[in-house]
C-alpha cells in the first residue's frame, strides 16, 4: 500500500527523484509514513541541479564575420585621365596584370623638354671637349717654343733677350689657364647631363605609373572609375584621391573573433576550433593563426584570427559564422549560482538520500557563465536546491541546464 502511495507521487513527470519511494523500500533511518503523515501528493516539487565536474574553461560560441585575406583600393601614383580600364567587377586577375592605363599629357611634355635639354647639353659637352683638344694642341706648341728659347738662351745668352723668354713663358701659362677653364666647363656640362639623365629617369619611372597593375592575384570587387575620368594622385587628400578598383584575395579568407578575457586561457596558436557557416550549412575545423599580445582596452577582448581556405570561392566575404571553442583546462566542481545562499557565509541546500534538505557550508572559487566553482563542502553528483528550509522533505526536479 505504501508503494502504491509512492507511485502516485511520480505522476508529476520529468527527471525527478522519488524520495518517498526510497522510504517505502525500507531504507535505514527513514520512518514509514503513518496515517497522520503528510499525504505524498503534497510533497513539493522543486527545481534542482547536480554539482558536476567540468573543465575550468567551458565551451564558448562566438559570432564572427568573414573578410578577405588581402584587400586594397588601387590608386594612381600620379594624376591623369583614365585612358583604358581592362577589368570589371568579378574579374579575376593575376599579380602583375594591367588593371588600367592613364593618359598624362603634362608628363609627356616634361619628358620632351628634358630630352631636348639633354641633347643640348651633349652638344655643349662635345664642343667643350673640342675646345680642350684645341687648347692642348696650342699648349704643346707654346711649351715647345718656350723650351727652344730657353735652350738657346742658356747656350748663347747674348743672342736672345730675356724678355722674349718671359713673354713665351707667360703665353704658356695663359694657355694652361685656358685649358683649366675648358676642363671646368666640360665637367660642368657633364654634371648637367647627369642631372638631366636623372630627371629623365624620374619621368620614365612616372610613366611606368601610368599602368596600374595588380599587386597580388585576386578578384575585382568594386570599380570606381570609367574611361575619361580624371584621376588624382594617390597621395592627395581623401576628398580628392579617387581609387580605380578594389582588389581582394578570396581563395583564403580571414575570420576574426573577439574572445573575452575570461576565455583567453584556452587561446593558443594552432589550436583547433569548430567553424559553422549557417548560410551554407558548412562545418569544418580551423586553427588559430594569430592574435595580438594585448587586449582591446575598450572591450576587454582579444581579436583572434583564423585563416579559412576558400578554393572554390564558396564562402563570400561578409557572411556570418559561429566559432566554437571546446572546453579546456583542468576539471573543477561547479554548481549553479542560484544554488548558493548567503547565510553568514556561502551555503547550499543539498537533497539527502531521504529527500530532506541539508544545509552545508561551502568554499567558493571563480564564478562564470551562471555557475560558480565549489572548492569544498560538497561532492560531485550532489543535488542542490536554493529556496527551501533544511529538514524539509521535497521532490527535486533536475534542471536540464545543469545536468
Image (spheres, helix red, strand yellow):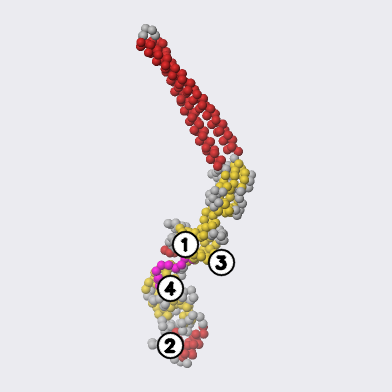
Can residue 310 be found in the magenta stretch? no
197 or 32: nearer the viewer: 197
Identify residue for label 3: 281
Identify residue for label 1: 287
Snapshot quadrant of residue 231: top right
Can residue 326 be found in the magenta stretch? yes
Label 4: state its secondary structure.
Answer: strand
Label 1: state its secondary structure.
Answer: strand
Between the residue at mark 1 and the residue at mark 2, the CA separation in whole angstroms equals 55 Å
Residue at coordinates 41% horizontally, 73% vertically from top-left?
Answer: 53
Identify residue for label 4: 335
Question: In front: mark 3 or mark 4?
Answer: 3
104 or 340: nearer the viewer: 104
For residue 331, the mark is none
Identify residue for label 2: 23
Question: In front: mark 2 or mark 3?
Answer: 3
Image x and y of residue 38, in percent:
46, 87
Amino acid at each position: 500500500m505504501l508503494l502504491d502511495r509512492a507511485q502516485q507521487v511520480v505522476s508529476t513527470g520529468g527527471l525527478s527523484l522519488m524520495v518517498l519511494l526510497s522510504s517505502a523500500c525500507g531504507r535505514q533511518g527513514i520512518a514509514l509514513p503513518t496515517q497522520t503523515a503528510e499525504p505524498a501528493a503534497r510533497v513539493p516539487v522543486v527545481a534542482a541541479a547536480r554539482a558536476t565536474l567540468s573543465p575550468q574553461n567551458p565551451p564558448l560560441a562566438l559570432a564572427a564575420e568573414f573578410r578577405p585575406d588581402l584587400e586594397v583600393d588601387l590608386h594612381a601614383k600620379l594624376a591623369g585621365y583614365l585612358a583604358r580600364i581592362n577589368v570589371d567587377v568579378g574579374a579575376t586577375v593575376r599579380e602583375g596584370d594591367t588593371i588600367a592605363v592613364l593618359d598624362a599629357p603634362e608628363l609627356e611634355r616634361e619628358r620632351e623638354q628634358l630630352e631636348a635639354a639633354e641633347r643640348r647639353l651633349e652638344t655643349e659637352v662635345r664642343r667643350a671637349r673640342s675646345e680642350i683638344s684645341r687648347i692642348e694642341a696650342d699648349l704643346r706648341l707654346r711649351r715647345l717654343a718656350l723650351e727652344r728659347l730657353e735652350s738657346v738662351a742658356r747656350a748663347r745668352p747674348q743672342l736672345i733677350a730675356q724678355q722674349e723668354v718671359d713673354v713665351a713663358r707667360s703665353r704658356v701659362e695663359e694657355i694652361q689657364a685656358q685649358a683649366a677653364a675648358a676642363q671646368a666647363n666640360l665637367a660642368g656640362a657633364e654634371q648637367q647631363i647627369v642631372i638631366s639623365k636623372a630627371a629623365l629617369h624620374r619621368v620614365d619611372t612616372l610613366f611606368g605609373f601610368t599602368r596600374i597593375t595588380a599587386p597580388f592575384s585576386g578578384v575585382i570587387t568594386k570599380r570606381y572609375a570609367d574611361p575619361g575620368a580624371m584621376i588624382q594622385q594617390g597621395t592627395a587628400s581623401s576628398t580628392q584621391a579617387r581609387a580605380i578598383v578594389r582588389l581582394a584575395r578570396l581563395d583564403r579568407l580571414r575570420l576574426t573573433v573577439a574572445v573575452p578575457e575570461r576565455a583567453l586561457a584556452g587561446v593558443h596558436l594552432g589550436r583547433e576550433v569548430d567553424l559553422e557557416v549557417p548560410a551554407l550549412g558548412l562545418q569544418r575545423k580551423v586553427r588559430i593563426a594569430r592574435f595580438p599580445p594585448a587586449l582591446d582596452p575598450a572591450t576587454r577582448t582579444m581579436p583572434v584570427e583564423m585563416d579559412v581556405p576558400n578554393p572554390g570561392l564558396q564562402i563570400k566575404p561578409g557572411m556570418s559564422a559561429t566559432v566554437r571553442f571546446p572546453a579546456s583546462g583542468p576539471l573543477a566542481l561547479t554548481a549553479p549560482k542560484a544554488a548558493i545562499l548567503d547565510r553568514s557565509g556561502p551555503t547550499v541546500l543539498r537533497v539527502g538520500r531521504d529527500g530532506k534538505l541539508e544545509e552545508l557550508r561551502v568554499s567558493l572559487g571563480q564564478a562564470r557563465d551562471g555557475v560558480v566553482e565549489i572548492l569544498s563542502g560538497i561532492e560531485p553528483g550532489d543535488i542542490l536546491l536554493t529556496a527551501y528550509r533544511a529538514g524539509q522533505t521535497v521532490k527535486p526536479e533536475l534542471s536540464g541546464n545543469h545536468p
